[in-house]
Image (spheres, grey):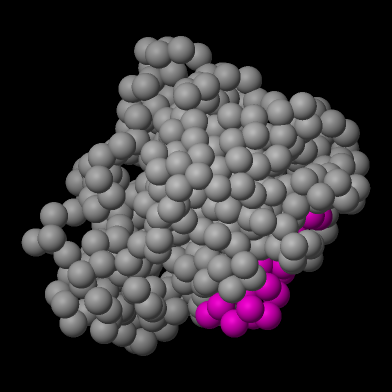
């Protein structure tokens, strides 16, 4: 892994920008890191060999929520978190800020894996998790710019409209009503998000827009106050039963938790477990109120449209667009490097797409470009679990839907580790084992072909007005 700061100092924002300390190199990671209050200077590294009850690798949302709920459950537990960079360095600090009820596997797939009731229970748990994040943030005094405005997904072609209808009818088959997901007519959809070419869409209330780095940095302060030792700049070299071996010493513990998501392939023994696929984002300068009057997004619902190559956005608390999408390449050997966060062609495509959706954005400047790896398991199904024979627990494979799912993972791991039987430990993702990815270069070929096909399928659907067979085939190949 190359050094942390992905941008040379000459590209850092001016010293006075947002009243932040420019000397924090981690500020340049994303718009969110750039605008989070307080310092991003790393905390103490692991001082040497130590003992704990639970040792966690990774201080993203998964690691921090797990530490949070464990410490609440049993304040006497000795909990150590080892983080290679700083808390919130990875996807947790850089994402689109959709705290949603999205789970990467569909209801139909969960029903096939377990049962219809289990799929419904999983979805209900995701709904409740959105509120849990908001409740804890408020209770702990973390101002993460929480706005529970739901999500509007726009249908901007007849094929996308059919997809919207299919999603709503799948929800109905599983007993979810209008209060969970409803179809929007064109006028209502346009009223929510005044984009071009809108034929309709869907709306769910189960999503909040947040400032993710504020949540991640707020959480690390909270867990530290609860007595958790979070060591930063502490790379873990190996995850083994009963110990985390780091470059600075060994942490011995009965329970180990792997919370490394998009970086997992860098750990010995996990090379083919989770593939890092890049998601990239841009943020505009703040837009004037008159522009927002034309665009809408009042109440800050998150938004996207129903194309195959995912796009997602939010209106930030300070009146910008934070807008992202897929399309950046997967790198051979599941390698992760800071330079992979910067793909000018994808940034240009995102800016173009934002302008096509909302022409009122005009010539607004893009002030930040960034990206990061999401973790994709071979069967596209997130999982959480604890192997009782080794004491090693894990959570991840969220495929870009981890902001809230990590909270459910943290609560579930706390239950599993403390031996508390609960509704959470009976959910269908618990103990699920995704198969390994193919060896290289097959993984590289499959994932990059998948990205190309999704992009091609979107163009094809616009041209033909019919659903793309290629996208359907690729969806099946990739495990849906
Ligand atoms: C650009 C982007 C946009 C996204 N948008 C959304 C969204 O809007 N909504 C949503 O739900 N999800 C979104 N996601 C996904 C979501 O952010 C992640 O699923 C979630 O944050 C994963 O949290 P995590 O703690 O498991 O992983 P991470 O936040 O990636 O944390 C893993 C941590 O482990 C550390 N680490 C790794 N290896 C080691 C090691 N060997 N030793 C020590 N430390 C190590 C890393 O430095 C990192 O801090 C997005 C992701 C990206 C990149």
Q: Along the line of sight, which residue is nearer the eye, 19 or 4?
A: 4
Residue depicted at 23% across the width and 50% down the height: 6
Residue extending farthest left: 10
Quadrant housing the C terminus = top right
User: Is there any visible trace of residue 132 in the rendered image?
Assistant: yes
Determine whether 280 is above or below 218 in the image.
above
Quadrant housing the N terminus = top left
Residue depicted at 84% across the width and 31% down the height: 114
Please provide percent x and percent y for residue 179. Answer: 78, 65
State yes or no: residue 291 in magenta. Answer: no
User: Left of 420 or right of it: where is 88?
Assistant: left
Q: Along the line of sight, which residue is nearer the eye, 243 or 356?
A: 243
User: Is there any visible trace of residue 182 in the rendered image?
Assistant: no
Q: Along the line of sight, which residue is nearer the eye, 350 or 154?
A: 350
Determine whether 264 is above or below 55 in the image.
above
Please provide percent x and percent y for residue 429. Answer: 75, 38
Q: Which residues are magenta?
A: 120-143
């Amino acid at each position: 892994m190359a050094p942390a700061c992905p941008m040379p100092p000459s590209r850092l924002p001016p010293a006075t920008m947002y009243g932040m300390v420019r000397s924090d190199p981690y500020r340049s990671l994303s718009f969110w890191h750039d605008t989070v209050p307080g310092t991003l200077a790393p905390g103490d590294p692991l001082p040497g060999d130590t003992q704990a009850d639970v040792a966690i690798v990774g201080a993203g949302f998964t690691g921090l929520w797990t530490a949070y709920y464990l410490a609440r459950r049993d304040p006497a537990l000795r909990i150590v978190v080892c983080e290679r960079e700083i808390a919130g360095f990875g996807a947790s600090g850089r994402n689109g800020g959709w705290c949603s009820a999205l789970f990467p596997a569909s209801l139909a797939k969960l029903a096939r894996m377990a049962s219809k009731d289990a799929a419904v229970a999983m979805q209900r748990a995701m709904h409740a998790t959105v509120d849990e994040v908001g409740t804890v943030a408020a209770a702990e005094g973390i101002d993460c710019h929480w706005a529970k405005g739901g999500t509007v997904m726009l249908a901007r072609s007849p094929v996308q409209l059919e997809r919207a209808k299919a999603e709503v009818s799948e929800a109905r088959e599983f007993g979810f009503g209008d209060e969970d997901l409803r179809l929007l007519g064109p006028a209502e959809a346009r009223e929510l998000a005044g984009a071009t070419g809108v034929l309709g869409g869907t709306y769910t209330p189960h999503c909040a827009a947040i400032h993710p780095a504020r949540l991640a940095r707020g959480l690390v302060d909270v867990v530290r106050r609860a007595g958790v030792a979070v060591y930063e700049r502490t790379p873990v070299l190996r995850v083994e039963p009963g110990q985390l071996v780091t470059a600075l010493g060994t942490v011995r513990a009965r329970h180990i938790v792997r919370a490394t998501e998009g970086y997992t392939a860098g750990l010995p023994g996990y090379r083919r477990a989770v593939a890092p696929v890049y998601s990239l984002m841009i943020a505009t300068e703040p837009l004037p109120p008159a522009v927002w009057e034309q665009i809408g997004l009042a109440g800050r619902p998150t938004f996207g449209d129903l194309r195959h190559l995912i796009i997602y956005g939010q209106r930030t608390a300070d009146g910008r667009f934070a807008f992202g999408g897929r399309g950046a390449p997967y790198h051979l050997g599941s390698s992760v490097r800071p330079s992979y966060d910067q793909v000018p062609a994808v940034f240009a495509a995102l800016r173009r797409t934002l302008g096509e959706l909302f022409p009122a954005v005009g010539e607004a400047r893009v002030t930040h470009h960034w990206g990061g790896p999401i973790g994709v398991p071979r069967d596209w199904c997130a999982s959480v679990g604890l192997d009782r024979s080794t004491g090693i627990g894990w959570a991840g494979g969220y495929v870009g839907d981890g902001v809230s799912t990590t909270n459910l993972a943290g609560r579930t791991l706390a239950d599993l580790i403390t031996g508390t039987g609960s509704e959470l430990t009976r959910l269908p993702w618990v103990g699920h084992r995704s198969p390994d990815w193919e060896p290289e270069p097959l993984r590289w070929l499959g994932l990059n072909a998948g990205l190309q096909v999704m992009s091609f399928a979107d163009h094809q659907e616009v041209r033909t007005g019919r659903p793309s067979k290629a996208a359907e085939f690729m969806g099946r190949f990739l495990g849906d």
